Amino acid sequence: MAIIRPTIIKRTRLKEARELRALSRSTKEYYEAFSDGYAAFYDNWPRAEDMFTDARYKDGYDNVAKVLADVAKPGEKVVDVGCGVGVWSALMAEGGAHVTGLDYAIGPLKKCGARRDERRLASRINVVLADGFRLSFRERTFDGATLNWVLAHVPVSRNAGFLREVGRVVKKNGWLVVSDSRWRGQEGGKEQVQLRDTDEGCYDIYKYYYDAEELRVLVSEEYGRVERLEITDYELICVATRREV
Ligand SMILES: C[S@@+](CC[C@H](N)C(=O)[O-])C[C@H]1O[C@@H](n2cnc3c(N)ncnc32)[C@H](O)[C@@H]1O
């Protein structure tokens, strides 16, 4: 049976930093197992079904699509870190960008490859299995980078290092788009463990919710100048330009 989306059964505050290693492993296992669910989730977006019957939720995703279509220019080299099933990679490639879709989980990455092939984007999307903490690209390889609903799964204690690694592979003046769920007082706190139920089983997920100012400070300190920060009902979208490196 197709999984439409996970159910969050419980949200608890992260108590011990030593939980993090097991939690990071379990978060990755969840994404390995849940790629069918994410593909189904995105099928619902244009049809405005399921979560997207909430117009505020749909608007958030529509806005990300608009921002990425606007920022990623034809011919640019872009890295989509944590690309998942490849919806945003495909969108940018359809606009003429050359995209490297990168993810540490093979399940969603295969779906990204399938999407690329279905849409005849083989010449514009390259898929890479890798951890965003250790990118196997030279300094200043890309004109831009994007992180969509990925930073929230990076332990907040390590977010600076993660952004620096992304910034390392982007050229001076290159762009960054970060989108993520917005902190709005969710149960469990800003840094939380979510127990998510899927047809494949239950997984503990690490999730951190940024507020707008916190994301602005982080991106400006670790990447470069923040040009835009959009706050929608459920999401934050931050656009920045790489400083001199
Ligand atoms: C919520 S999904 C979002 C996927 C996609 N960006 C989107 O917006 O549809 C988070 C994705 O980030 C990936 N991810 C999380 N941490 C990662 C890391 N350290 N390195 C690479 N990928 C990571 C997961 O495997 C998953 O595919």
Image (cartoon, grey):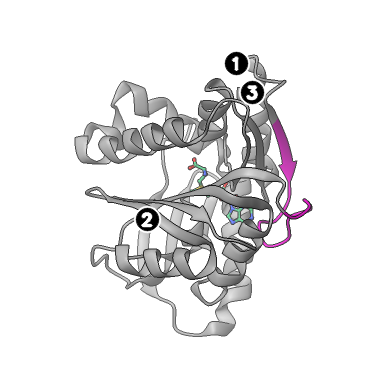
Residue 97 seen in the current view: yes
Q: From what the image shows, is residue 218 above or below residue 127?
A: below
Q: Dot 3, how many residues are within 10 Å of its Cα: few (below 14), some (14-19), or many (20+)?
A: many
Amino acid type, mark 2: Ile
Please, what secondary structure does the residue beneath circle 3 have?
A: helix
Residue 111 seen in the current view: no
Residue 20 belongs to the span the image colors magenta = no
Residue range in magenta is 126-139
First of labels 1, 2 by sequence position: 2
Give the x, y percent position of residue 206: 49, 65
Labels 1 and 3 touching (C-beta < 8 A): yes
Please, what secondary structure does the residue beneath circle 1 have?
A: loop
On residue 8, the disc is 2
On residue 158, the disc is none
**Quarter the C terminus occupies:** bottom right
Amino acid type, mark 1: Arg
Cα separation, mark 1 vs mark 3, equals: 5 Å
The reply, left or right, for residue 213 in relation to residue 221 is left
Give the x, y percent position of residue 58: 28, 35
